[in-house]
Amino acid sequence: MAGTGRSRSHRSKKKRITLALAPVAALAVIVPLMNQANAATSSEVTADCASDSEELADCRFVDVQFKANSLGPNERVSAVTDNCGSTGTATKTFNVSTSVTRTIQLEEGSTTEAGTKLGNSFFEVGLKFSTSTINITRDDKTTTLAFSRMDTVQADSTAFFMWSAKRTDVSGFLKATYKEPQDGQTVFFAPSEGAATVHVFYPQILNNGTPDGRLWLRNVKCGTAAADSAPNSTKALQDAEPGFGEGGADVTDVEIPLTAVPAP
């Protein structure tokens, strides 16, 4: 009988200890969850970095990977010359003009200006990718390409010049350091540490100081679906055109070597 009583008393003591520890364990789970909920979100970090918030001690772009000679958007860079209804070719003068600058692709399409902590960081990272073989623009200064030349417009066609800039695409993430801890933490990443979703496009520059890229003359047959979608001479320059050789059967693209472009 006495042996049975001790056994029952032992089980009762073990149960009391378990009940006493349960609230402590529950608190240990709640605390980190609360910290995580109140920490700066990726969007908040990006917004603070882009606006050069006074709450930041520093914000830097950390590069993860890069791709040289990445082509930018396809842009129409001359007015459209009309040779519709003609049975013969025509020689026309084209005035070509375009410009390039460093562009930054942050979350939700936001950008940042030079002179900010983040802008200075982009410049410093750019130094790393400017070499003797590839010269890039590291800041937000504009570099232009402008010239006039005569070219052939095909019979019953319109023609205009197209351009796609060569860029060094560097991707990575943002590392923000706050002056005051937020729930005990001062360093945050956007969108996350090791991500490669923030892009900085550094335009590549030729030795003569003009932008590097692909330049081509595009002829479009009049009265075709391609002609209907092509921009007319009164519209602003376009950036939604098909790429080189991608216009279809009614479009003829002829690449123009940049060595054939008149020197500035």
Image: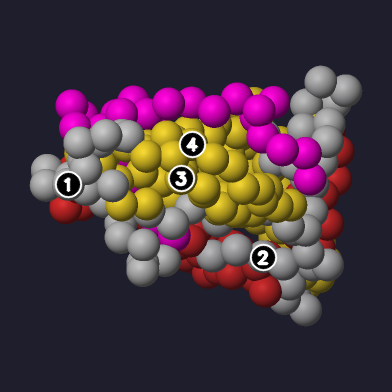
Q: Amino acid at mark 3?
A: Lys
Residue type at tag 2: Thr
User: Which residue is at 31% across, 29% downward?
Assistant: 252
Count neighbours of disc 1 (C-alpha within 10 A) and say few if under 14, some if 14 to 19, many if 20 or more. Answer: few
Q: Is residue 210 left or right of residue 65?
A: right
User: Which type of secondary structure does the marked residue at label 3 adopt?
Assistant: strand
Q: CA distance from mark 1 to mark 4?
A: 18 Å
Residue behind mark 2: 112
Q: Secondary structure at mark 2?
A: loop
**Labels 4, 2: front one:** 4
Instruction: Single out the mark in the foreground, 1 or 2.
Output: 1
In this picture, is 88 found above or below 189? Answer: above
Residue 151's disc number: 4
Mark 1 secondary-structure assignment: loop
Front residue of 17/57: it is: 57
Q: Residue at point 82% right, 41% down? A: 209
Separation of residues labelled 1 and 2 (CA atoms): 49 Å
> Is mark 4 in CB contact (under 8 Å) with mark 3?
yes
